[in-house]
Amino acid sequence: MRILVTGCAGFIGFHIAKRLLSLGYNVVGLDNLNAYYDINLKYARLAELGISENEVNWYRYIDSTRYANFRFIRMNLEDKQAMQMLFGNGEFDTVCNFAAQAGVRYSITNPYAYIESNIDGFMNILEGCRYNNVSHLIYASSSSVYGLNTKVPFSEKDCAEHPVSLYAATKKSNELMAHAYSHLYGLPTTGLRFFTVYGPWGRPDMAPFLFTDAILHNRVIKIFNNGDMLRDFTYIDDITEGIVRVISSIPNSDKAWNSEFVDPGTSSAPYRIYNIGNSNAIKLMDFIKAIEMELGVIAEKQYLSMQQGDVYQTYADVTRLYRDFHFTPNISITEGVKRTIDWYRKYYNI
């Protein structure tokens, strides 16, 4: 199988590319290497995949020196002509779209970046799949689509029509766009709503990385909503395991789907939505305590009000994930935090 993985220099895209390569798949990785956060971390991830920084700065197409079955392409999703050429020549069986402009708070101050990457870019992905016989499109959605929902745990059956950030709105838009293509053209699509992913090689703008970095450098950590929040922290290896299982299961039309009793997670089209989360909402202060215990340091804390775009809690119902794939994320917070901090110390030589 030949798989296109977009966002392969990003957190989740890097991990799934590495996992697929280890399983023997032929992988083409795509990334634009933008400077939303430390680009050196992106270069380091690519180095793990056998792609050197020097080559990336000179060439668009680069073959890996570590994996014979990996090629990297530097490209923007929103570059329509380049994407058409990529799909026309790529002969991809499956596409895993994990490239996106990430970040809830950044979307408040830089909205157009999200429209260009997450909407225009995703449109090019859909068109590429439509015209080039791609058998399955898997794409990253987000727990943020649940927005103002207060019923927990969040289920794919629940309404998700009230996002509280533009980032969330673009992810919900991706789900709707995918459904239209599944319905109109029979393109099998699977959207994955990820819940607060953390782990080695994680994003520097996310809480687990921010807290660890601040504590180890004797800086104050900022705690929003006075710490009164719950998050379904999910370790990256659980995410990649879920993705791998989904890749090999192409959705069919749900013959039992009933328009009078709408289930948003499935359809009469070959379309599915799944939560991938730890299914265990953790108090933010307990997560911080786990980091403090692993580091052996008590953090100096600054308590602040809730930020725009944030929600009080996230909590995944993964019943459907287990039913269809016999998998439930199971790596504990204690173990996940330990692995993450071990990586951090090694990477930054602390």
Image (spheres, rainbow, N blue to C red):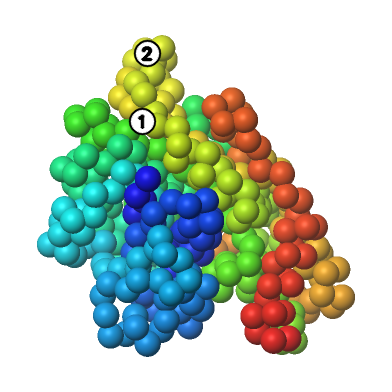
Q: What residue is shown at x 48% (from left), y 57% (from top)?
A: 21
Q: What residue is shown at x 32% (from left), y 33% (from top)?
A: 188
Horizontal and vertical percent for residue 319? Answer: 61, 29
Left or right, residue 49 beside residue 284 = left
- Could you tell me which quadrant the N terminus lies in? top left
Task: Please indicate, yes or no, whether residue 78 appears anywhere in the rendered image.
Answer: yes
Furthest-left residue in view? 81
Q: CA distance from mark 2 to mark 1?
A: 12 Å
Above-or-below relation of 33 to 310: below
Q: What residue is shown at x 27% (from left), y 80% (from top)?
A: 59
Left or right, residue 194 beside residue 134 = right
What residue is disc 1 on? 271
Above-or-below relation of 276 to 272: below
Camera-side residue of 72 and 169: 72
What residue is disc 2 on? 255
Task: Please indicate, yes or no, whether residue 174 appears anywhere in the rendered image.
Answer: no
Tell me which amino acid carries mark 2. Answer: Lys
Horizontal and vertical percent for residue 301? Answer: 75, 75
- Could you tell me which quadrant the C terminus lies in? bottom right
Disc 2 crowd rating (10 Å Cα; few below 14, some 14-19, many 20+) is few
Q: Tag 1's secondary structure?
A: strand
Above-or-below relation of 190 to 210: above
Horizontal and vertical percent for residue 22? Answer: 53, 56
Horizontal and vertical percent for residue 182? Answer: 27, 32
Which numbered marker is on residue 243?
none
Q: What residue is shown at x 21% (from left), y 59% (from top)?
A: 86
Tell me which amino acid carries mark 1. Answer: Tyr
Left or right, residue 49 beside residue 216 = left
Camera-side residue of 318 and 157: 318
